[in-house]
Image (tube, grey):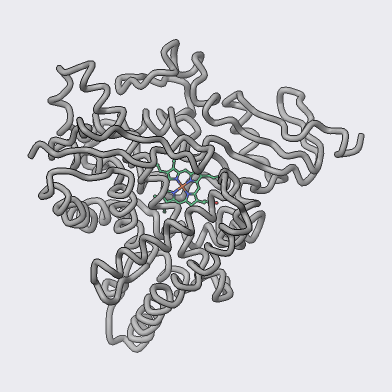
Amino acid sequence: MSAIAEPSPIVITDLEEAKEVYRQKSMRQGLYDAGEVVMSGVLVNLHGDEHRSRRRLENRLFRRETLAYYEDELFPAVIEDTLAPHVAAGRAELVALGHQLMMNLAALNAGVDRPLGTPEETFRLYQQMMKLIEGATLTHSTRDHAVVSAEVRSALEAFDAEFVTPSLNRRTRLLESLARGAIGEDALPRDVLTVLLRNEDHLNLPRDVVVREIGFFLLAGAHTSATAFTRSTHNILRWLDQHPQDRVMVSDRAWVQRCVHETVRLNPSSPTGVRWALEDVVLKSGRTIRAGTQVVIDLVTVNRDPLIFGPDSEEFNPYRLVTVEGVGPYGLSFGHGMHACIGQELAAGVPADGDAQQHLYGLATMAVKALLERGVGPDPDDSPVLDASTKRPYWSRYPVVFAR
Ligand code: HEM
C-alpha cells in the first residue's frame, strides 16, 4: 500500500500508545515544521545520532546538583527582585509578569547575559523572546505566517547582536582564562552556552545554530513555565475560593508543586505532540503507520483518561493520586522517549518521594508560591481575557492584585 492511501494525520489518544510513538526511532519531530525560522537545527528538531550527541552534551547541565544550585542559590533572589515592583504597586498583569520572571530565570540557564543591566535592555530581550516564541509556535498562529517569519528573522538578528555575541565573547574569555589556569572551574557560569562553547564532545556547531539553540532554550524555558505559572495561579485561586480550608496550604511547597503538576496535566504547554513516520511502523496494538504519515498525539485527551486519572479527570484536584506505574502526575505533558523535556525537573521538580533533602520543587512551583505568599488575588475591576491570536488556550491578560 502506498503512503498516499494512509489517513494522515493519525491521532493517538491512548497513553500507552502515545508513549510507544514517542519512543519510535523511526519517527521524527513534526511539531515545529512551520517554525523553521527559529527552530531549524535546534535540539528538539534533531533526529537520530545528531540528536543523541547534542542531548548528551547538554544533559550535563541538568544534573541534580546543578538544579539544586539554581533552586537554592540562584533563583530566589531573581524571583524576589522581579516581583518586588509589582507587589509595591499592589497589582500586576500575570501573563507579562510570568514571562518576565521566567525569562529572567531561563536566561541564567541558557547563558544569556544582559551587559548593560538596565530595565530597557531587559525589555528589549523580552520583546525579542516573545517574537521568537511566536516563531516557534507558528503552527498554531492565526496571523499570516510569512509576515510572522520575517518579524522573527529580524528579532533573531537583534538577539544575536545585542545578547548572544557579548555572552559568547565573555564565555570565550573565561574559557581562555581557565585554559591558562588563571581561574578555576567554579568561575565558569553554569549554563547551556558555556556547555556548547566548551564543546567537549567536539560537535562543532555552526554559529547560527548556536544562536538559535540559545534562543530556543530561552524561549522553551520561559514560555512553557510562564504559561504553567499563570494557569496554576488561576487554578489555585479558584480552588481556594471553593475550598477556603486549604488557604493554609499556600506556604506548603509540596502542595503548590502538586497544583502545578495537576495544572500541567490538564493544560499541557503544547496540546499535541507531532511526529512523521520515516518508515512503516507496526504498534503493539497492531495499528500500522505507513512511512510518510503524520502522527498527532492528543495530549489533552491522553492526560484526561479516566481509567488512569480517575472519574474526575477533567477537574483540577491537587489531591489526585495517580497509581498507574510509569505515569507521572503531569501525564505526558513533558513528553516521553528521546525528546522528553530536558527541563522537566528544572520547571517542575520531581514528584515528592518522601525525602525532603533530595526534593526539587522546580521554578514554576517556587514562583507560584512566591505569588501566593504575597496575597495574590484576581483583580475585581479587570477580568482575565483569553488570547484570540492563537488556537492554543492561552490567557492574553490576567490582571491580579496583591493583598500584602
Ligand atoms: C512546564 C514547563 C514545561 C513543559 C510543559 C515542557 C514540555 C516539553 C515537551 C512536551 C517536550 C517534548 C517535545 C516533543 O517530544 O516533541 C519538551 C522538550 C524540551 N524542553 Fe520542555 N517543557 C517545560 C519546561 C522546560 C524548561 C524550563 C526548559 C529549559 C531548559 C525546557 C527545555 C526543553 C528542551 C530543550 C526540549 C527538547 C528536548 C529534546 O528534544 O531532546 N523545557 N518540553
Residue at the spot x=25%, y=32% of the render? 256
Asked where in the image residue 39 lies, by quadrant, the reply is: bottom right
Q: Position of residue 55 (x, y in %)?
A: 53, 57
Q: Residue furthest top?
A: 311
- The residue furthest right is 1
Residue 271: x and y in percent read: 53, 35
Decide if residue 50 is on the left or right side of residue 126: right
Compared with 148, 297 (above or below) is above
Please state which of residues 197 and 140 is positioned toward the viewer in this rendering: 140
Q: Residue furthest front?
A: 381
The quadrant of the rendering that contains the C terminus is: top left
Residue found at x 54% / y 31%: 299
Q: Residue at 27% of width from left, 68% of height from top?
A: 120
- Residue 35 pos. (x, y %): 60, 54
Above or below — where is 310 with respect to 275? above
As drawn, is 80 to the left or to the right of 67? Answer: left
Name the residue at 52% across, 58% down: 56
Query: Front-most of 329 and 224?
Result: 224
User: Which part of the image, by quadrant, shows the N terminus?
Assistant: top right
- Up-down: is 42 above or below 281? below
Whether residue 352 is visible here, answered yes or no, is no
Judged from this view, the residue extending furthest toward the bottom is 180
Is residue 48 shown left or right of residue 377? right
Q: Is residue 73 visible?
A: yes
Q: Position of residue 132 (x, y in %)?
A: 48, 59
